[in-house]
Amino acid sequence: MRVAAIDIGTNSIRLLKAEIIDGQLKSGNKALEMTRIGEGVNETGELSEAGMARSVKALKEFYEEAKAWGAQRVYALATSAVRDAQNRETFIKRVKEACGLDIEVISGDQEAKIGFLGVFSRRGKCRGQDTGNRRRWGKHGAYSGRFAGNNLGKEC
């Protein structure tokens, strides 16, 4: 199964295309676009028009690239800048209108857990991670399918 994940960070947007083979995430290729969506968020509390425009353009291109490559699922997660912005819903709506991509904004705790799990997931199969008391499955899979953690959901 081919999957793609898009990480919308404060300064850059990253695309990872990968295949899941026998429960293992086999990395395909990666792309990075510096969009600086977070510029000015700390001062104004909002995403700038320029930052949103750059990011929408990059997301549309990444989404189209992933679909043309044959990704059956494309996950998009936004972190700090989008999470903290008062106008995040405007940005999310613009992306949806531009290319049909749904963005999930994750909490700081989710972001930290995903990063931690990503370091250790390279050692074995990509399975839903047991948090000690229950398995956490978001609407996109384990820990919301964050690709950085190589936890791309129930498909793994």
Image: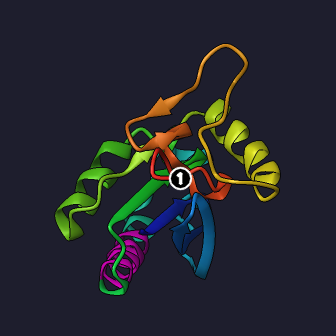
Is 138 positioned to the left or the right of 96 in the image? right
Question: Which sits in the foreground, 107 or 89?
Answer: 107
Residue 3 point in image, percent of width and height: 44, 67
Q: Which residue is mark 1?
A: 156
Crowding at dot 1, Cα within 10 Å, few <14 / some 14-19 / many 20+, comes out as many
Identify the image quadrant of the N terminus: bottom left
Residue 61 point in image, percent of width and height: 36, 82
**Helix, strand or loop for the magenta stretch, by majority:** helix
Question: Which sits in the foreground, 2 or 61?
Answer: 2
Amino acid type shown at disc 1: Cys
Snapshot colouring: rainbow
Determine if the magenta segment contains residue 88. no
Name the residue rendered at 49%, 64% in the picture: 6
Quadrant of the rendered image containing residue 88: top left
Residue at the limit of the structure toward the top, as seen here: 133
Determine if the magenta segment contains residue 65. yes
Residue 27 point in image, percent of width and height: 63, 75
Question: Which sits in the foreground, 80 or 22?
Answer: 22
In the rendered view, tell whether residue 93 sits above or below residue 114.
Answer: below
Q: Which residues are magenta?
A: 53-67
Residue at the limit of the structure toward the left, as seen here: 97
